[in-house]
Amino acid sequence: MISRPLLAPATIDAADLVLRPFVEADEPAVAAAMRDPGILRWAAGLAVLDAPEAERGRRWLGPRITGWEDGTAALAVTDAADGTVVGAVSVRDVNRIPDQAVMAYWVSPRFRGRGIAPRALDAVARWAFTPTNGGGLGLHRLNLYHAVVNTGSCRVAVKAGFRMEVTMREEFVDPTGQRYDSHLHARLATDPRPEISPPVDPRHAANR
Ligand SMILES: CC(C)(COP(=O)(O)OP(=O)(O)OC[C@H]1O[C@@H](n2cnc3c(N)ncnc32)[C@H](O)[C@@H]1OP(=O)(O)O)[C@@H](O)C(=O)NCCC(=O)NCCS
């Protein structure tokens, strides 16, 4: 059996966003996100989809709260001004392959179109590359997978400095059982830091 590291829960400041470990009180925000068809299709996972609708928030949240004990650093993306949970970025399978991990993310529908996902992803990547004695995870390579048809996710990955490396044939199976080709993107600790636009004023953001 692979032994997974105990990770030290961290909080990351990123301009208008604060990323911090999930807590039980986030359940209503997570439950609302788990009603979004895009999140359910691309980011929730089969364990959530198998749960009754009323249980989906708790089903997603539980393993993200305890994940720090076994190799998953799951961070709530919150609005620095008022603490609202706007999304999530997870670093999973930390050191399952030495110095590597896998990124996943979602943004709740009403907060989309403001560039939140690329900024949150970049902030978590920089933290994950920070040496452990500096409070980070000390990783060298971060992988990210998305269905090729999920073009929004592809844009997010590229904007956050995750270069597209290869197309993986029929790698992703959606909740209906349909298979999709996926892109493998990755960012290395040694890659240049991406230039990311500053926060978008929510009054000018287009909702998706
Ligand atoms: C994908 C997702 C994370 C984007 O979050 P976001 O904070 O709205 O992202 P942004 O506002 O920065 O948009 C990022 C880029 O993607 C583009 N984009 C976003 N949604 C898009 C869509 N549905 N179709 C095409 N392009 C899209 C934006 O135009 C932007 O590119 P641009 O800067 O060149 O205009 C969000 O839509 C989401 O949570 N989707 C469901 C879950 C999911 O797919 N997670 C990823 C699983 S791999």
Image (cartoon, rainbow, N blue to C red):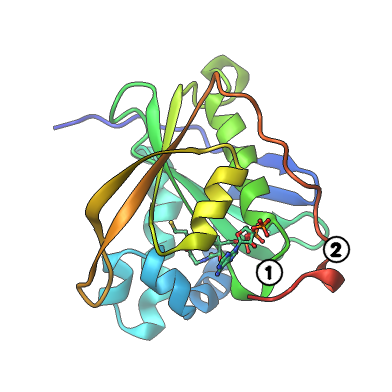
Label 2, residues with CA under 10 Å away: few <14, some 14-19, many ≥20: few
Q: For this rendering, which residue is in front, 120 or 47?
A: 120
Residue 171, quarter of picture:
bottom left
Mark yes or no: residue 22 visible.
no
Q: Are marks 2 and 1 in contact (CB under 8 Å)?
A: no
Q: Residue at the location (81% across, 48% down)? A: 198
Q: Position of residue 46 (x, y in %)?
A: 27, 67
Instruction: Say what secondary structure mark 2 lies in.
Output: loop
Mark yes or no: residue 149 visible.
yes
Q: Which residue is mark 1?
A: 111
Q: Residue furthest left?
A: 1
Instruction: Check the image and report above or below for 123 versus 208.
Output: above
Q: Is the CB of the residue bearing disc 1 within 8 angstroms of ligand 1? A: yes
Q: Position of residue 29 (x, y in %)?
A: 58, 72
Q: Amino acid at mark 1?
A: Phe
Mark 2 vs mark 1: which is more N-terminal? 1
Q: For this rendering, which residue is in front, 9 or 175?
A: 175
Position of 91 compared to 4: left or right?
Answer: right
Instruction: Check the image and report above or below for 59 versus 18.
Output: below
Instruction: Say what secondary structure mark 1 lies in.
Output: helix
Q: For this rendering, which residue is in front, 41 or 134?
A: 41
Q: Which residue is mark 2?
A: 201
Q: Quadrant of the N terminus?
A: top left
Residue 164, quarter of picture:
top left
Task: For marks 2 and 1, give the CA distance.
Answer: 11 Å
Q: Position of residue 191 (x, y in %)?
A: 56, 23
Q: Residue at the location (49% across, 21% down)? A: 138
Position of 205 compared to 65: left or right?
Answer: right
Q: Residue at the location (62% across, 40% down)? A: 122
